Image (spheres, coloured by chain):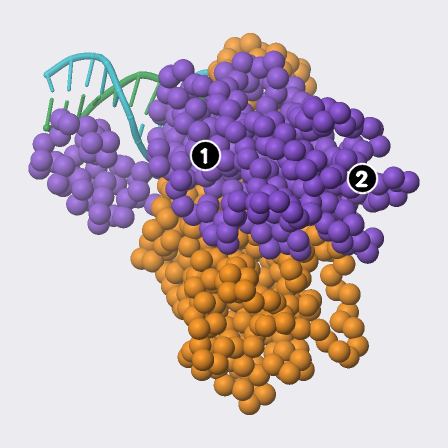
Chain colours: A orange, B purple, C green, D cyan
Amino acid sequence: MASIKDVAAAAGVSVATVSRVLNSHPSVSPDARARVLGAVDSLGYRPNAVARSLRTAQTRTLGLVISDVLNPYFTELARSVEEEARALGYSVIIGNADEQPDIQDHHVRTLVDRRIDGLLVSPTDGGSPLMLEAAHAGTPMVFVDRWIPGLDVPVVRSDGRAAVRDLVAHLHALGHRRLAIIAGPAATTTGSERVEAFREALAAYGISLPDAYIGQGDFQADSGRRATERFLALSEPPEVVFAADNLMALGALDAIRAAGLRVPHDIGLAAFDDIPWFVHTDPPVTAIAQPTKELGRTAVRALIDRIEGRPPQSVTLPARLVVRRSCGETKSPAPAPADTPTATTSTRRNP
Amino acid sequence: MASIKDVAAAAGVSVATVSRVLNSHPSVSPDARARVLGAVDSLGYRPNAVARSLRTAQTRTLGLVISDVLNPYFTELARSVEEEARALGYSVIIGNADEQPDIQDHHVRTLVDRRIDGLLVSPTDGGSPLMLEAAHAGTPMVFVDRWIPGLDVPVVRSDGRAAVRDLVAHLHALGHRRLAIIAGPAATTTGSERVEAFREALAAYGISLPDAYIGQGDFQADSGRRATERFLALSEPPEVVFAADNLMALGALDAIRAAGLRVPHDIGLAAFDDIPWFVHTDPPVTAIAQPTKELGRTAVRALIDRIEGRPPQSVTLPARLVVRRSCGETKSPAPAPADTPTATTSTRRNP
DNA sequence: CTGAAAGCGCTTACAG
DNA sequence: CTGAAAGCGCTTACAG
């Protein structure tokens, strides 16, 4: 592959001049510029980004470590992050932790070794030593979705508290009183917060959340399945199960179906995180939708602010309830047609 | 951040010795090794991968350019690629082309500029000049899923021909004769091949595939919706619609629902590419499943073979039909229970 | 076993 | 406007 030396030789100038042309430095004669551009063209020269990074100490690359790529929520987040980063002149390298702290650490280490300019993380756990070290070592960092308390790292996330209250109001209006939740790992913020929000919302109706109605999941489908099986085996099973993410909801659907029961006739189901497929499940699933695309964009901007020396900001965006049919039909006024089929493609449009 | 010089100074040795310890070169005295390791530890030193890459002319990084991350098929492919690459000591940088040739080219260019060791591509089009150049310029390259004919680049893909024949046999047995397809872009191999496979399979039953029954899609949900609307507006609409990927099937479901029709009662639906959600749609969707995980693994191995100078091999793996209920119920022997709820998590297990 | 030195491909003061 | 030179952080023959 041609190097800057080859270009300089072909153009009959020094490598310094080639570099200046390449970086649109003003003081280059039109003649030299033309000769360099000609040489670049005929040699098919492309600057070596590795060498450039070594010299300038910046890679124009962002790292994104997410908990699980197979989770459509994170896929959409990753897409929006990459889109915004690209628009701002950065590339992004995605690391998939697969909800495993050691894989997460592997990615963080690799990313830091490659000297990425900044790191976007949705931590899988409460904070491994490596993650804490990275945060303190001064790698510009921003948390998205999940975060680690006690660190001086900006957080971009959404607040589902109000939406969970709306959900509980909806369930209560439908006459449901025995309400259970499948929680995520307590070590994650989204794991514990969603349970707390649910518990508080129930309390407002004088409903308690007994331990038997708290299933311990890990945000993966299998755990949703197991938790639901346990609920169904109870002498008094819940009337509605609220899964703290979409994969556990999928597992819950599996378990309910395997037990020969029907949603919502025999048991209701709701989920945190909305995805296009929920419009098409049997029945369509009532869910809490995060402003995922906006979250990704905002997180990138916050990180780049930090990288470029501007004060970064933590941002919290509201989530909203999308009522469908999986908890039973509302008898009263029809629910707002919030999700026409076009919901599928909403991710393709800018708000 | 500490550099190799700092470590050398702290350990009282030369940078050459530090480098030898880091790369487990045999000829280092135990004493020197211990002092270096101690210094590395106390300084929290991590080698700069950028500098190392510049020097060794290898990045131990693979590029993967896929057509659409939001398509669960590609997400799963990407995951399997990353997993296998990691196991073999490589990182992977994913570029999402979003089915747009110019974005695809952007990623190819960026990846080549970063001097990735090899490129895995599922091309969005018939071959942009840049892609052809990259292939000829000697960047080790392997095509996955889709490929560009006429290039000397190994291809790892799956053959759906037999599965499409099984599908047509299934539809024929159910009494369906008016069969339509929503095709992908003709410029992609998977776009054209699936139509041809379908046409051939129909021919075996003396059924023709009229132009009106070929919807032109682009592998995105919206195009599936529009094509289906057009089918439904026909004076003689098809009895079954076969979507060439899962997103267009989702769009078809939308259109059918919007028209107030039911699947399979009013119209049948089948899809190429199986995904966990198809078990839970209303009704569960009959689909052709690719060995996606295996495809990703095989592609990585082929690419690394090429990178490390071993002769790489093209591989074609068979796809298989998974019968569910979206084309009507089989009256005769119940279909094999190929997809119990555990299908959801099958991607978590090794075959 | 060890170190001095060259060099990977760039960028950027510095001097002219 | 231009070039010679230093240097980013490594690795690796080469000589001892």
Element type where label 1 sits in the image: helix
> Which residue is pictured at 51% across the width and 80% down the height?
A199
Image quarter where the C terminus of chain A lies is bottom right
Q: Is residue B128 left or right of residue A200?
A: right
Asked if residue B265 shows in the view, the reply is yes
Q: Position of residue A79 (x, y in %)?
A: 59, 46
Kind of residue at badge 2: Pro
**Please, what is the three-letter code of the amino acid marked with disc 1?**
Glu
Residue neighbourhood size for the residue with mark 1, other residues' Cα within 10 Å, grouped as few (<14), some (14–19), many (≥20)? many
Sequence order check, earlier mark of 1 and 2:
2
Look at the picture and state if A72 lies above or below A193.
Answer: above
Circles 1 and 2 on the same subunit = yes
Residue B182 location (% of width, % of height): 74, 36
Work out whether residue A91 or residue B35 is closer to the camera in this orientation and state it: A91
Residue B14 in view in this figure: no
Q: Secondary structure at mark 2?
A: loop
Residue of label 1 = B294
- Measure how far apart labels 1 and 2 are at the Cα level: 35 Å
Nearer to the camera, B163 or B211? B163
| Relative image position of residue A222 (x, y in whole percent) | 45, 58
Q: Chain of mark 2?
A: B
Picture disc at residue A240: none
Q: Residue drawn at (54%, 81%), measured in percent from left and top?
A: A178
